[in-house]
Image: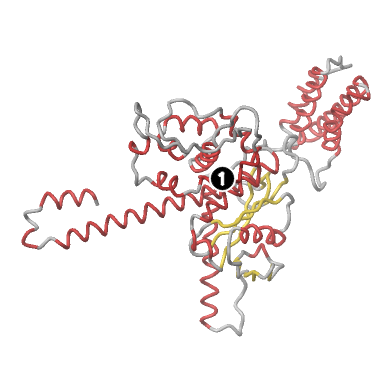
Amino acid sequence: MLKLLPRSPKNTQPNLFHNQLRDMLDSNDPLVTLADTINWEAFDDSFEKYYSDNGRPAKPIRLMVGLLILKQLENLSDENAVLQWKRNPYYQYFCGMTEYQPALPCDPTDLVYFRKRIGSEGAEEIFAMSVKLHGKDAEEKQVIIDTTVQEKNVTYPTDGKLAIKMIHHLHRIAKDEEIQLRRTYVKEIKGHRISLRFFRHPKKIKKARSAMKRLKTITRILIRDISRKLGEKKVKKHQETFDLFLKVSDQKQKDSNKIYSLHEQHIYVIAKGKDHKKYEYGTKASLVTTMKSNIIIGVAAHQKNEHDSKTLEAALESANKHRTKPIKEAICDRGYRGKKEVDGTAICIPDSPKKRDSKYQKEQKRKKFKRRAAIEPIIGHVKSDHRMQRNYLKGFVGDEINLLLAASAFNLKKWMNHFLLVFFMLRILLIIHILTQIKRDQREKYANLYLMLFRLW
């Protein structure tokens, strides 16, 4: 039986009527070099299990993986990533095209289906590739660990917003099931919405509280009315939604495990103590970087809002997964107080100097803890440059996928910048070598050559 698996095309025979895409590009461009360095066949072998043997052939795996990487590298949405691929021949070469393609590679929703297909395991394969590219630089004995918040794409949560959303959702259920409600409360809700608008004003707090109480009562009335008219069989279809709405209506201000969003129920509130943003709504994420080379070698998303010291095991497990040598020392901030060793890795936390320490030991510790701050700008770049500032992917799986792809993009960008630096230094050395070979008395004869080399430099 012929297998219609989406492997990358291996036909390198040139087309008689079209130029080869490689011949049109700058061979020294970092994206071209990165495309030639990545082992794309490894992705074909790893992701082959996610596809069926029958049906219409899917898009090539290299195309989909390349689009995911480019999307995170350039901080693009799914729609813009597909559109820029059509306009940019370097993007097309990176995704395995041998000739220029004037059409869109796929529908933007295909990227959604591909992320769902490979899941967090597939995203981890991409992340592992980005770590292996750096070779020995990713094998350092000392690492730095820190946590940050991956904010979810949700509106600022208030009880009033949640109550009105639940009522509108119940209205849609009644319309879809063709149920005639005893009363819709549409006009009454408008008045309560206005009352909630200025709930912080001292003279309007009482009116806002009564409006909020009434909205919760309306939610319960509508749930009971719809449940009665649906019947036992159809109620089971919406029972999970009704239970969620009742839980949201009953939650109090100081309750734990509160629900802050109807479509992202797993998120929690984190108080980071920032002046511009007191609270952040999302999930906690751990990043592990090497001490000298600043490569992200491990990431972990946390489903519960745990103390930082309890996140060390997951973070170190992720980091050791992509290494051949175990980590000997992890440098953390004071938020990780509580543990001194995790699975054979020493946890080093800033503390006041000890009397028995020599001057050399104190200086080494001071340098080590100063170096710990290097992870802070890395977190900032991963957020602002690689789509971790606000996560648009649904569910906790979306948190894991977005974190892994953002870290992969950071590592690949670092590899490309390192390649540019090496290439620039080679050009400088070549210019210096040429200039030293020309004798002083002959330099006037080669004035044009000097001018050309100066411009090249």
Residue bearing mark 1: 43
Q: Position of residue 39 (x, y in %)?
A: 50, 48
Looking at the rendered structure, the secondary structure element under dot 1 is helix
The residue closer to the viewer here, 395 or 123, is: 123
| Image mark count | 1
- In the picture provided, is 50 more to the left or to the right than 431? right
Q: In this rendering, is residue 384 above or below 186? A: below
- In the picture provided, is 80 more to the left or to the right than 214? left
Q: Quadrant of residue 154?
A: top right
Q: Position of residue 443 (x, y in %)?
A: 9, 58
Q: Position of residue 119 (x, y in %)?
A: 66, 42
Please name the amino acid that badge 1 sits on: Phe
Q: Quadrant of residue 232?
A: top right
Quarter of the picture containing the N terminus is top right
Q: In this rendering, is residue 144 above or below 420? A: below
Q: Residue, x 54% and y 30% (percent of image)?
A: 79
Q: How is the image coloured?
A: secondary structure
Q: Quadrant of residue 144?
A: bottom right
Q: Position of residue 254 (x, y in %)?
A: 81, 47
- In the picture provided, is 12 more to the left or to the right than 199? left
Q: How dense is the environment of label 1, judged by Cα within 10 Å: few (below 14), some, or many (20 and up)?
A: some
Q: Residue, x 72% and y 58% (percent of image)?
A: 307
The residue closer to the viewer here, 18 or 375, is: 18
